[in-house]
Amino acid sequence: MENRTFTISVYSENNVGLLNRISGIFLKRHINILSLNVSESEIDNVSRFVIVVETTEKWVKNIVGQIEKQIEVIKAFYHTDEETIYLENALFKIHSNLLFDEKQIQNIIKESQSTIVTVSRDFFVISKSGRRSEIEEVHAKLKPYGIMQFVRSGRISVSKEKMEVSTLLEELKK
């Protein structure tokens, strides 16, 4: 089996220590987490972890099984990139004078469909949403001009197929 990128979605109660236990599952198997995002989900009082890893399908099945053994976890799923719609977000902080002095900066912003978030006397901030490769491309184009700060979010994703976690929760309430 070859390594592939998988997105793991974990629906859980929001309890202290769960993130530590979940990350320990990956640590024990020497699997690096490429990105991690935790937020509210579409279900009241339920959090959703979105974890991106590169591993084999055998290992990701094993990991999802271990995650589901955690008491607070309601359900965990895994998907390939082809089975999800996903994005990342990035912010680039750059010296203000470049916005006006370097025409190429304006072209990079326009061609990459980035957005200027704020402009001040000393700096301006660009926001870019897209796939990791699109963000890396913008980063590579802006790097020669000098990036003061750069930050990228973890992956956010939704599955193309319906995830039956809402139905599962309704059944548990009965």
Image (spheres, rainbow, N blue to C red):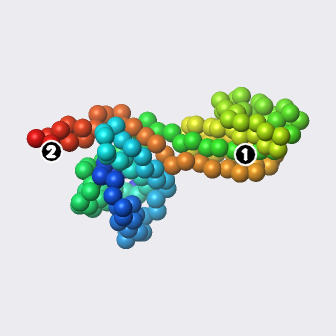
> What percent of the width, then of the height, locates residue 155?
49, 46
Find residue 45 and report its horizontal and vertical position in percent: 31, 45
Residue 1 shows up from this direction = no
Residue sitting at the far bottom: 28
Q: Residues within 10 Å of mark 2 (few under 14, many from 20)?
A: few
* Residue 25 as seen in the image, left or right of residue 165: right
10 lies above or below 158? below
Q: Quadrant of the C terminus?
A: top left
Query: For the point 82% across and 44% down, which residue is it?
Result: 122
Q: Which residue is mark 2?
A: 172
Left or right: 168 with respect to 24?
left
Q: Quadrant of residue 22?
A: bottom left
> Camera-side residue: 166 or 58?
166
Give the answer, above or below, for where 29 lies relative to 151: below
Which image quarter is the N terminus in? bottom left
* Element at label 1: strand
- 63 vs 81, left or right, is left
Q: Residues within 10 Å of mark 1 (few under 14, many from 20)?
A: many
**Which element carries disc 2, helix, strand or loop?**
helix
Given residues 107 and 100, the one toward you in this image is 100
Q: Is residue 21 among what the camera can see? A: yes
Q: Which residue is tagged 1?
A: 93
Q: Residue at x 76, y 51 (%)?
A: 148
Which residue shows up at 43% across the image and 50% down it?
38
Q: Residue furthest right?
A: 101
- Going by the image, does 63 lie left or right of 86? left
Residue at 36% of width from left, 64% of height from top? 17
